[in-house]
Image (cartoon, rainbow, N blue to C red):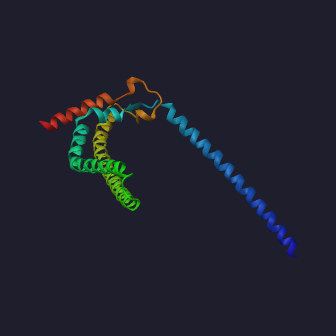
Amino acid sequence: MHFSLALVRRYNLKECNLMKKNISILLCVVSIFFISSAFAKSNAGVNKIAVLDTQKLLAKTKATKNAMIELRKKYAAQSKELEKEQRELQADIKRYNKSSDKLKLRKLESWQQEIDEQQGDVYRKQAVLEKEIIDSQNIEIREIVQRFSTIVTNIAKRDNLDIVLFKDVTAYTLKSQDITEEAIKIALKKSNKANE
């Protein structure tokens, strides 16, 4: 009795697995049908697509240039201090190398340890400063891109565009599909109006 019950369970398990496979196949076929019909509907009307060169847009606008100037000013003092510490470190390394054959081993080891600590400190400060600068740049660029997003959205609505892609993610586009120059002109106009 116990043996036949195990056979029934094994048979039911195989049947259950087969049913799961059949349902999965049926769901895949239905999904493919719906996806292909949706794709056919979307291709029935031609999508209007444009591209935007964000690098060019950022490079040619006053907002980006002004933001970078402000960032340089903001971190100028820290950069100068770090450069001073780097020069001091290089001078210490130079003195160490010149004096290494004249000093006793214990003094050399102590001096080497001081230089290593000084070097580690300079590298840590440099890493922190670079991270601060990069984070600040990213925040500024994000804000600028957000402002450009409004310009791009207005162009897309006006021209009845369905999609605006970034130029750097496309393999090929027609020059007529590039809205970058128009976005730059609008951004410059807005910038000039704000300065008046």
The quadrant where residue 60 appears: top left
Image vertical order of residue 115 relative to residue 48, above or below: below
Task: Give x and y (percent) for residue 40.
Answer: 55, 35
User: Residue sitting at 41 percent across and 32 percent down?
Assistant: 167
Task: Give x and y (percent) for residue 122.
Answer: 32, 53
| Residue furthest bottom in the image | 1
Please name whichever residue, 118 or 101, is drawn nearer the observer in this view of the structure. 101
Please name whichever residue, 181 or 117, is drawn nearer the observer in this view of the structure. 117
Q: Where, quadrant-wise, is the N terminus in this rendering?
A: bottom right
User: Residue sitting at 17 percent across and 34 percent down?
Assistant: 192
| Residue furthest front in the image | 102
Image vertical order of residue 76 relative to residue 11, above or below: above
Please name whichever residue, 108 or 161, is drawn nearer the observer in this view of the structure. 108
Task: Give x and y (percent) for residue 96.
Answer: 34, 51
| Residue furthest left in the image | 196
| Residue furthest top in the image | 175
Q: Where, quadrant-wise, is the C terminus in this rendering?
A: top left
Task: Give x and y (percent) for residue 11.
Answer: 81, 63
**Label total for image:** 0
The quadrant where residue 72 appears: top left
Image vertical order of residue 47 relative to residue 76, above or below: above
User: Residue sitting at 31 percent across and 54 percent down?
Assistant: 125
